Image (tube, grey):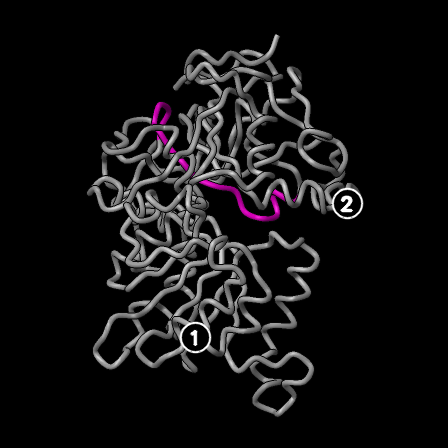
Amino acid sequence: MNASSSSSSPPQTQTQTAWTYTTQGLPRQILSINHNYPVPPPPSGTDLFIRVTHISLNPGCYITLEAIPTWVRRLVSGGKTEYVPEGEFSGIVVSVGSDVGDNSSSSSSTPSPSSDSNADPKFTSFQQFKPGTRVFGCLPVPSLLGGSGTLAQFISVPSTQVCVVPSKNMTMAEAAGLSGAGLTAWAMLNEVPGYGVSEIEREGSKPRVFINGGSGGVGTMLIQLAKAQGAYVVATCSERSRELVKSLGTDEVIDYRANSPLPEYLSRHYSSASTRFTHILDTIGSQSLFESCASYLESTGVYINVGNFEGIFKTVFRAFWNEWAEVRARWGMGFIGGVPRTYKMISTTPNGAKAAILAKMVEEGKLRVVVDEVVGFHAQESDGDGKGRGVLDAYDRMLARNVMGKIVVKVQNP
């Protein structure tokens, strides 16, 4: 019998249900449901043992499923041969390690300094974890590469990567999609040294931000956070997503299909001194958009990319190549791919203290997670919408790039 999923009490058996894989490939080709996957050991130190209620799917995960060789996962994981995908989650704390605050008497609403010694002081949060606390978070890249994912009934994670779910304005399904996408958007806007949106002074006018891919999980967060910081926002999406993207606060919406090729359109309409952008935030990973950006990105602006839809290995190579594009251009070497603009490729580092800033914005009604659909954990199980879609169907939709916001999997009842 697998682990019980009816309460936040510790599982009575050593196995659980999880979606797993043993080789590389597309989700439908390699994923299967395993009812006898090992339950993590009891937490130690600052770890939390969490009963997962929801997880949100991330495009980066299915891309790495296909791209990362099995021997790499075995090496990173220390010899594992069976792996669990995905990294974002919400759930209920079942038990805590011995170093997680006062785990015997504190209330989840009692302030307690975050134990994250690496957190920026301005992000210091006050939150207490104890059994029964509703939490959300995401895993670091090494865990994802090693196949220690969240598409399972139980996980164990460091408390420094977890945050308490807001007490209002957020469901557990929405909470599952906040940390990964939200922290990525926050980093794009605020954590590239010298290029934070609030740092830009543009002769008294607002920073002008262009978002490539405004309807995805990261894009919907970028729009809201950029507007909250006073930026003028232009974003791309399909005609189907226009209403959603506009409702999030976007000042101008561009249908990328109707105005293809996009770089040429931007060169025609956003090349003047008053319309050029201070930031181009690319959630897709378009090389042509970067190569032409000198026409529509200010000379002091920055191009920040988190997208890898053109392939992970091609993306890694281009990140290195593009980082030096400005140097090549300045040295008169534009004939080998010089672009006289600053390029940065960044990734997300899970941080519960910073996630608490996003949670506070949600609680205050200043930020929301856009959930496209909630699907069931088991094959062909829906969340009550009658469509009968499950995990594999959700991955198919993501591969078709037919998603607005996040797709969430309901693993079990809260």
What secondary structure is found at the residue carrying circle 2? loop
Q: Position of residue 195 (x, y in %)?
A: 39, 72
* Farthest front residue in view: 258
Which residue has dot 2 on it? 69
User: At which x and y percent is residue 388?
Assistant: 52, 16
Q: Give the range drawn in magenta.
A: 130-145
Q: In which quarter of the image is the C terminus?
A: top left
Type of the residue with mark 2: Pro
- Nearer the observer, 116 or 104: 116
Q: Where is residue 312 in the image (x, y as percent from the top left)?
A: 66, 54
- State the SS at label 1: strand
Camera-near label (2 vs 1) is 1
The Cα atoms of the two marked residues, 2 and 1, are separated by 37 Å
User: Is residue 344 positioned above or below 161 on the image?
Assistant: below
Residue 17 lies, with reference to residue 140, above or below; the image says above
Mark 2 near mark 1, Cβ–Cβ under 8 Å? no
Disc ID at residue 297: 1
Viewer-nearest residue: 265 or 289: 265
Q: Residue at x 59, y 35 (%)?
A: 149
Percent of width and height locating residue 258: 47, 54
Who's the residue at 61% across and 35% down the image?
A: 85
- Which residue is at the far top? 1
Asked if residue 134 is among those painted magenta in the image, a careful observer would answer yes
Residue at 36% from the left image edge and 65% from the top image edge:
209
Camera-side residue: 344 or 246?
246
Q: Which image quadrant: the N terminus?
A: top right
